[in-house]
Amino acid sequence: MDLTFLGSAREVGRSAILMETKKSKVLLDYGVKLNEELSQLPLPVHGFVDSVVLSHAHLDHSGAIPYLFKATEPTVYATPSTIEVSKVLLEDSMKIADSRGQDCFTRSDYKRMLRNIELVPYHVETQVTDNISFSFSDAGHILGAAITRLHINDKKEIDMVYSGDFKDTDTRMHKGAKMPSKADVLIVESTYGDREHPDRKKLEKEFVEEIRSVIDVGGTVLLPCFAVGRTQEIVTLLYANRLECPVYMDGMGSAISEIYLEHAELLRDYEEFYHAMKWVNWITDRKQREKVFDEPSVIVSTAGMLTGGPAVGYIPELRTIKNAAIFFTGFQVPGTPGNRLLNEKVFDYEGFAMDFRGFNIKWFDFSAHTDKNGIHKFIKAVDPQLVLINHGEPEQSEALRKWVEEEIGCYVFTPTLREKFGLEDFV
């Protein structure tokens, strides 16, 4: 049994891991690199692919799957809600690609993908090939996200856990992932492999206080938010604190919220979320967008890294409002407009570099990923013979590798692109 890393090797984005036996080829995720163009694909797969096991809907895990259907026709396995959310994200990414002339797959490729989907609920053992089966468990990351446990019967029988993106502690939207049981091999994310997240309750209090301080002096707050998970969490948080000003929700987060409303069984507190969705003002057209600046307000809008969406359109208007603020609620990937605005105080808009020096711009760490402490607990629970660290920048991946080497003492690697591992050599 060989594993080859086609993406997410010492980088965040384009997760793609190829599992090969003599009888089969199975992919764990096949996503794009998250940058302004959303166009950087994983390394290609040559020949027929039997199946793709998709951990969750985010484009850095799902965004390149339709591209596979140019040359092959695998079965795509995912949880039901992952597919619902993936459709919204993929269709939006196709629109963006069309507008920029950067298509990497066609709508026909996408339709072929839709015809080859198999929905798999949590905790259901599913056979993908003669010698590979898997089951999903809730990853606590976003709606439908899954930790994948695989059983491989090739030259040897091997149990493997693929963490995907996971969150081990509760948020307003989701319960934290449960620690997995023992396995031989672990592929684990390292997005925050060298740092801790702030205490969530303290973070929420600080965040709401900062928003109130802007509203109290007549300002408006723009909260660029990821459409999946973050928009819903932030609106629910603002509702829970009964913010005394209009709160608006705009962009793709509204469409994703509709999907969340259909999955009460997957949410930590559905009743609170339901009432938050009734409370918030849904923006549906341009006329409504023009009215949001009539009084101090909060705007929750996609895109979270300002790569597009209504949030971008609000920014020029914010420059004219006294005491306005922009508060980011998610990590800003280097190379994105959000990262440049946060760190350089410059925003590129329609060919102009807007100067935001002196503007109230802050970042709050509402991450849906676990931190180093959660990753450490996860690795200890699996107690593997081999750890392969992915989905992290080199500094984070290397910090986690050193910890595993010193504290666990098993085989541990931070793969590079194209690097192949024969599992029987380690198990």
Image (cartoon, rainbow, N blue to C red):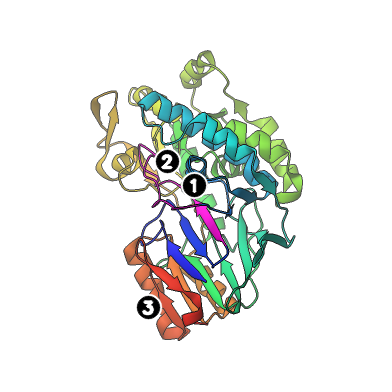
Front position in the image: 319 or 350: 350
Tell me which amino acid carries mark 2: Phe
> Does residue 77 sit above or below 326 in this rendering?
below
Q: Is residue 36 magenta?
A: yes
Graded by Cα atoms within 10 Å as few (under 14), some (14 to 19) or many (20 or more), the crowding at tag 3 reads some
| Residue occupied by mark 3 | 402
| Residue occupied by mark 1 | 207
| Residue occupied by mark 2 | 327
- In the rendered image, residue 22, in percent from the top left (x then y), is placed at 54, 67
**Marks 1/2: CA–CA distance:** 9 Å
**Marks 3/1: CA–CA distance:** 34 Å
Tell me which amino acid carries mark 1: Phe
- In the rendered image, residue 278, in percent from the top left (x then y), is placed at 70, 31
Quadrant in the picture for residue 309: top left
Helix, strand or loop status at disc 3: helix
Q: Which residues are magenta?
A: 24-47
18 left or right, relative to 337: right
Q: Is residue 334 magenta?
A: no
- Which of disc 2 and disc 1 is earlier in sequence? 1
Q: Are marks 1 and 2 in contact (CB under 8 Å)?
A: yes
